[in-house]
Amino acid sequence: MPSLRRRLLAWYRAHRRDLPWRRTRDPYAIWVSEIMLQQTRVDTVVPYYERFLTAFPTVRALADASSDEVMRAWAGLGYYRRARMMHEGARQLRDQAGGAVPTTRDELRAVRGIGPYTAGAIASIAFGEAVGLVDGNVARVLSRLFAIDLDMKASGARVAAEIADALVAPRAPGDFNQALMELGATVCTPRGPACHACPVADVCRARTERRVDALPRVAPRAAPRGLAMRALVATSAEAVVLGRRRATLRFGGMWEPPCIEGEGEAPWPTWLTIARDVALVRHVLTHRRLEVTVDASHGRASALERACVALATSLGDTYDAVCAVRTDALDSVGLSTLAKKVLAAARPPA
Ligand code: SF4
């Protein structure tokens, strides 16, 4: 074990990628990076991370920001619940602890939006607490190193968490955890791991037992289910109607052209002249395959204003605000990638 730790640490210090969140011990910055990195590639995260920290440099700054400001900074990164939960967590810390981030994994787990993995990352990297962590990369590395022959989405995850806690280097837990993550991200990859470049290949059970490709064991995920939707892109010369989705819904807090789910009659205002079925937009999420039929309407600003009032009532379960947003100010609201696709699809070709 000591040799495995030593070798992993030495390998990490020689090979780690220079990433912005690795140049800081600020627990808030590490928190932001870990939340953004969930389900998202490093290259995608870097510019978002830098912009987000410029906009909200402290827990207090994030806590004091409006939900619209936070969602705007997150727009395009996906998995918007992460942003909402982190915003709530920042408000909790501002109200309960003057904005201070807790220093132990157990205390961190009590903060809204901080799960076991993020708590372990902040505690070990920012505060040097000797606790392990398991993300997808670490789960893969540990499942192969120790030949964990269990479903990594079920009992295998618990076993991996126990191993991670037992394995962590007491004097450099942050670097050690990042070494495991980095090994999983760059060497022990899902397909075709570069075992010849692995610093612990000689003690890897999966390699010795020739089972590298069989591990980790993960039950196949159900294919995303299809969901038919219909959206209305209603514009005037200067504005477009957008609704802000209620916080508890998918894409909660984000703005989009009014949308309904299912094949039923759309509640679009009768006084709008509407061109139906002008486009079909497809968008795939982890669990859903969305197919959005787009209707379009172009008319006077006054008709748009009335439409906002009507849609705010008829779609009140979905949107907590509906308004006409100037088309030259769309950057100032948080638009999901799907909303941008729908808007682009409704635009007549130039
Ligand atoms: S030897 Fe190969 S399978 Fe084993 S930990 Fe290293 S990269 Fe992963």
Image (cartoon, rainbow, N blue to C red):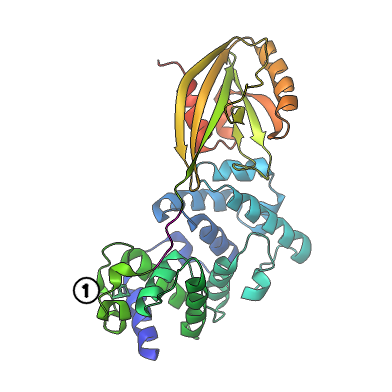
Question: Total marks drawn?
Answer: 1
Report the residue at 29% width, 78% height from top. 199
Residue 11 covered by magenta stretch: no
Point out the stretch of residues depicted in magenta: 217-221
Residue 11 image point, x, y percent: 32, 77
Q: Is residue 124 above or below residue 229?
A: below
Which is more toward the observer, 262 or 275? Answer: 262
Q: Is residue 165 left or right of residue 42?
A: right
- Say few, some or many: other residues with alpha carbon within 10 Å of mark 1 (under 14 / 14 to 19 / 20 or more): few
Which is more toward the observer, 301 or 297? Answer: 297
Q: Is residue 243 above or below residue 190?
A: above
Task: Determine the main secondary structure of the stretch shown in magenta.
Answer: loop
Looking at the picture, which amino acid does disc 1 mark?
A: His
Residue 313 image point, x, y percent: 75, 26
Report the residue at 50% width, 35% height from top. 338
Which residue is identified by label 1? 196
Residue 278 image point, x, y percent: 47, 18
Q: In terms of image quarters, where does ligand 1 lie?
A: bottom left
Whether residue 169 can be seen here: no
Q: Secondary structure at mark 1?
A: helix
Q: Is residue 194 left or right of residue 252?
A: left
Quarter of the picture holding the N terminus? bottom left
Q: Is residue 303 above or below residue 93?
A: above
Residue 219 covered by magenta stretch: yes
Residue 97 image point, x, y percent: 75, 66
Quarter of the picture holding the C terminus? top left
Picture quarter containing residue 60? bottom right
Whether residue 157 can be seen here: yes
